[in-house]
Amino acid sequence: MQYIQKLSLLGVVIISLAMSFFSYANAPKEIFWEDLIPKGHVQIDTQDQANHEGSEQNWVQPDLDAPVVKELDGKSVSLPGFVVPLEGDSEVITEFLLVPYFGACIHVPPPPPNQIVHVTIKGGVPIESLYDAIVVTGVITTETWSGDIAQVGYKIKAIGVAPFEL
């Protein structure tokens, strides 16, 4: 009888460990903006160059052929950033650009395409303030998207959006 109990207990432990492993393996990987730039690529820093004076050239999106990290394609990730709304209503947004700093694409020139993510979320999500950073969780792809305000190097089909907390 003790043999069966020990065997049962061992089975429960193995199943618990396997479930923990698989839930960890499927957990979204936390990434940051520098992770969207391939190793060895020298990225143009548009945030420091942004200004509202001078020619319209200051408002042109730079480095349109900036490479993406192909290994991220199809991965479940979480990425913090700021919202540039594209589609939605007064209650929720269903489509937006996620950018690394406040004002990108609105108040200053857009960053390179590999520093902008086009996000869609089925059913939408309320965004209380565009000044606040958020974290988007979903599956990232290396698909391009182009709109009136920017060309984009990545897309995320979001399954969740939450406030960013340090």
Image: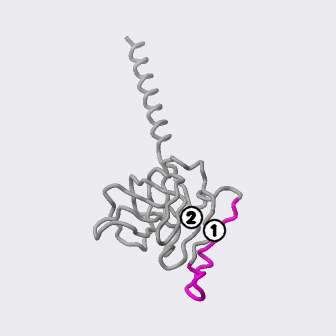
Q: Is residue 51 magenta?
A: yes
Q: Residues within 10 Å of mark 1 (few under 14, many from 20)?
A: some
In the rendered image, residue 68, in percent from the top left (x then y), is placed at 60, 56
Between residue 98 and residue 88, name the one nearer to us: 88
Instruction: Spot the residue most to the left.
Output: 91
Q: Are marks 1 and 2 in contact (CB under 8 Å)?
A: yes
Q: Quadrant of residue 47?
A: bottom right
**Residue located at (42% from left, 53% from top):** 157
In the rendered image, residue 148, in percent from the top left (x then y), is placed at 47, 71
Q: Report the residue marked by disc 1.
A: 63
In the rendered image, residue 30, in percent from the top left (x then y), is placed at 52, 53
In the rendered view, tell whether residue 4 sits above or below residue 49: above
Q: Is residue 5 left or right of residue 74?
A: left
Magenta residues span 41-59
Q: Report the residue marked by disc 2.
A: 113
Name the secondary structure under disc 1.
loop
Between residue 159 and residue 55, name the one nearer to us: 55
Query: How far, Cα to Cα, is label 1 from label 2?
Result: 8 Å
What's the amino acid at mark 2? Pro
**Residue located at (60% from left, 50% from top):** 70
In the rendered image, residue 31, in percent from the top left (x then y), is placed at 54, 55
Name the secondary structure under disc 2.
helix
**Residue located at (43% from left, 31% from top):** 16
